[in-house]
């Protein structure tokens, strides 16, 4: 994860809000220590170091999270995949037009949740390939916000706004001066313009992109790998997904970035309360497509 956490709590007195904040901060820090591969002492780093040579005992939190990731890997037909870290590392210092000469295909053969072995009896994790590594960056914020949401409700906080790196946001209850929280998506080609405003109440918004903006407003690509091809997602794209589940929106924002519009439409039509936009900046201006439908089915 390695990101900022900002919390706004309304409707309670300052001292109580401070107590709740400190409890949340403690738990978020603990989850960060467990989930972040940037931390060499984290549980996931320990798994990545040893799971290819022997079964690694893990905490209940990590074991359950890997099971959740396996479920979403299946639901998204492999578009969400925590095992693609070797591919991400491979492309981290290369351009999309790099001639891989079969290297990518070899790496793809070592990835996939079928190469992660979970033993329910002793709560261990092992890998079938030496090069396989897992990375929770595509679901860690969602998992953390689900935990934060439970804490807020346990302490009877009805209205709160929690942002993890401004990319995954929990909007609990309502704004102090309205009946929802307004979260606007800015146009990176024209920062003074909003592309879309999500009206969120008891929901979560997650945004994923394959670019970043420098201090001068210029967009630069960053390697986000398509799990199906093993190559970076082309163009300059961002996806924002809003729904009631923090886990679901972060998974889908990542999966939708490398998927076709027809697949996004299919998923949205079969998931209740999903609002999503996909924006393409390749032409130099924002081209926005919105997907929003409510039906009875659910992928949760």
Image (cartoon, grey):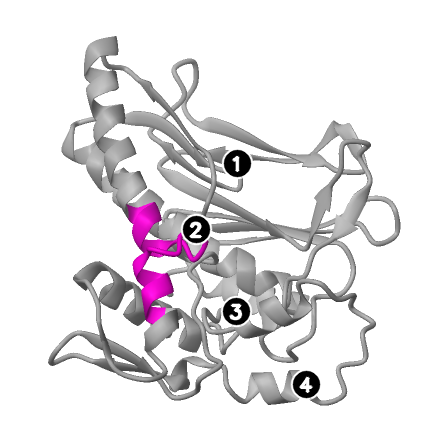
Q: Which residue is mark 1?
A: 166
Q: State how far apart marks 2 and 3 are (Cα).
A: 31 Å
* Secondary structure category for the residue under label 1: loop
Q: Is residue 74 above or below residue 281?
A: below
Q: Quadrant of residue 148?
A: top left
Of mark 3 and mark 4, the one earlier in the sequence is 3
Instruction: Tell me if I can see residue 297 in this picture.
Output: no
Of mark 2 and mark 3, the one earlier in the sequence is 3
Residue ID at (43%, 74%): 73
Residue nearer the viewer, 44 or 53: 53
Where residue 129 appears, as percent x and y from the top left, is 43, 87
Where residue 4 appears, as percent x and y from the top left, is 46, 34
Where residue 195 appears, as percent x and y from the top left, is 70, 37
* Secondary structure category for the residue under label 4: helix
Q: Which residues are magenta?
A: 31-47
Q: Which residue is mark 2?
A: 273
Q: Which residue is mark 3?
A: 85
Residue nearer the viewer, 254 or 103: 103
Q: State how far apart marks 3 and 4 are (Cα).
A: 14 Å
Residue ID at (75%, 66%): 94
**Image quarter of the C terminus:** bottom left
Image marks 4 and 2: residues in contact by CB distance under 8 Å: no
Which label sits in the foreground, 2 or 1? 1
Where residue 40 appears, as percent x and y from the top left, is 39, 56
Of mark 4 and mark 1, the one earlier in the sequence is 4
Q: State how far apart marks 3 and 1 are (Cα).
A: 23 Å
Residue ID at (22%, 25%): 20
Of mark 3 and mark 1, the one earlier in the sequence is 3
Q: State how far apart marks 2 and 1 are (Cα).
A: 22 Å
Image marks 4 and 1: residues in contact by CB distance under 8 Å: no
Q: Which residue is mark 4?
A: 103
């Amino acid at each position: 994860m390695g990101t900022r956490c900002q919390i706004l709590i309304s409707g309670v007195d300052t001292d109580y809000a401070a107590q709740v904040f400190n409890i949340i901060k403690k738990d978020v820090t603990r989850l960060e220590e467990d989930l972040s591969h940037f931390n060499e002492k984290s549980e996931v780093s320990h798994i990545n170091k040893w799971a290819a040579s022997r079964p690694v005992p893990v905490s209940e939190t990590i074991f359950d999270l890997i099971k959740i990731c396996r479920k979403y890997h299946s639901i998204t037909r492999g578009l969400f995949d925590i095992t693609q870290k070797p591919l991400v590392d491979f492309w981290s210092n290369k351009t999309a037009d790099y001639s891989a000469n079969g290297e990518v295909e070899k790496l793809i053969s070592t990835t996939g949740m079928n190469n992660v072995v979970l033993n329910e009896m002793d709560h261990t994790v092992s890998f079938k390939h030496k090069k396989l590594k897992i990375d929770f960056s595509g679901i860690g914020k969602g998992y953390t916000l689900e935990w934060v949401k439970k804490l807020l409700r346990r302490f009877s906080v009805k209205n709160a706004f929690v942002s993890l790196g401004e990319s995954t946001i929990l909007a609990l209850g309502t704004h102090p001066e309205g009946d929802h929280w307004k979260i606007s998506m800015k146009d990176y080609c024209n920062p003074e313009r909003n592309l879309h405003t999500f009206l969120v109440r008891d929901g979560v918004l997650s945004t994923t992109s394959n670019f970043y903006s420098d201090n001068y407003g210029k967009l630069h690509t960053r390697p986000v790998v398509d799990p199906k091809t093993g190559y970076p997602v082309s163009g300059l794209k961002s996806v924002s997904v809003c729904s009631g589940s923090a886990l679901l929106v972060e998974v889908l924002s990542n999966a939708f970035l490398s998927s076709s519009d027809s697949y996004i439409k299919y998923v949205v039509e079969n998931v209740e309360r999903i609002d999503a936009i996909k924006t393409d900046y390749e032409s130099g201006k924002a081209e926005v497509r919105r997907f929003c439908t409510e039906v009875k089915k659910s992928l949760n």
